[in-house]
Image (cartoon, rainbow, N blue to C red):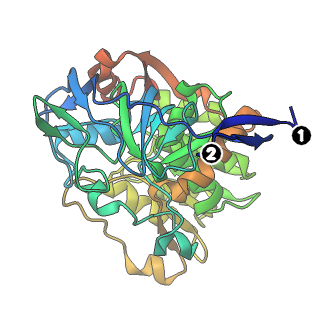
Amino acid sequence: TPGESYPLGKTAGGRLRMLPYPFRLAYSFPSTCPMKIRAAVLEEFGSPLVVQEIDLAPPKAGEVLVKVEACGVCHTDLYTASGADPSGYCDCVLGHEGAGVVQEIGKGVTSLAVGDHVVCLFSPECGECVNCKSGKTNICTAIRAQQGNGYMPDGTARFSKNGKELRHFMGTSTFAEYTVMPEIALAKVNKEAPMDKICLLACGATTGIAAALWKADVEQGSSVAVFGAGMVGLGAVVGAKMKGAERIIVVDPSAKRRELAMQFGATEVIAGGDNGGDEIIDMTDGLGADYTFEATGNVGVMGQAVEAARMGWGKCTILGVAGRGEKLEIIPRFLITGRTVLGGSFGGAKGRTHVPQLVDMYLRGELELDGFVSHHLTLDEVNKGFDLMHHQDGIRSVITF
């Protein structure tokens, strides 16, 4: 009751120590780790993931134990598993598009508490490094080096099997029942949001949506061309629609994907091909689109997206990840005549700042996410998720635990 005091314990002299209301107490619970969990492990490039029981060590200082509730099967997971990723490694626990509930916090963690709902971020936001303080980028450098090597910030892993270390993936490893992550790589979100929808904001959906909302900052009444109608490309369509773009042209060879693009807000769709850029120019009276977004990872298509951007002020945002050793060739004239080419890692979103905002937009009905989920799978069906992706069956498969 406000205004009253409650006994907290006795002093050395035997007197009661009273604590006035309101108060907040911090409790220390025994660790739930080390623990046995099931996870999908990449043991060999080009081979199916192996779902198996492994060990998970407890969170250390600045780390958090998360019970994963839902996880999207993203093209980046397949890209790494195939061996095409030049920075890929194994053995490791894959998965990076996850959402879950905080189960335990390590020493020094102050922004999260047990029971909080979180979206897992491969792109952290510490707020303290030079990059974060600059306000010019979303690429935080606080834990980047160790994360790229598959380790936690202290250079060690929390996963293992039979005493042998298993590395983390993108600092997240959400193809697992539980995962340990740095505090700065978790975005606290509204508990009312369904996990199987907001997990998409951990990567694919945010990459496209944020690129249109904030990175490219699409203007109302403008023309937009999106190359690729997968998860990221459709996210760009949604973001461009939210910003009030007048024309949104989507280029994709798949008739099913083109149909989906129309459902998500595209005004026109074309199959594209080797001359997709030329088609966009023709459709815009020979001028090109004010904004173009590339979401395929194909360097040839990236070139088309640059060419299709309007002369004078066209802005091309590259969102796809190219294969090992591939290079993008750009004719200098395209740049000299005023086009701008941007890189859009995570769509330029600052994870702990923007992802909770996107979740709130979704809950208010301003942001479409439900239609992105085409299949629900179990962890044991993770390789089926890759097969569905390979056959372009649906948009995103989500594993629920």
Mark 1 crowdedness (10 Å alpha carbons): few <14, some 14-19, many ≥20? few
* Amino acid under disc 2: Gly
Q: Which label's residue is closer to the chain start, 1 or 2?
A: 1
Determine which residue is flagged by label 2: 13
**Could you say where residue 349 lies in the image, as x and y percent from the top left?**
55, 56
Tag 1 near tag 2, CB within 8 Å: no
Q: Residue at x 38, y 54 (%)?
A: 301
Which mark, residue 3? 1
Based on the displayed image, in which of its 4 quarters is residue 139 positioned? bottom left
Callout 1 secondary element: loop
Q: Nearer the viewer, mark 1 or mark 2?
A: 2
Callout 2 secondary element: loop
Q: Quadrant of the N terminus?
A: top right
**Could you say where residue 384 lies in the image, as x and y percent from the top left?**
30, 19
Residue toward you, 25 or 103 = 25
Residue toward you, 209 or 14 = 14
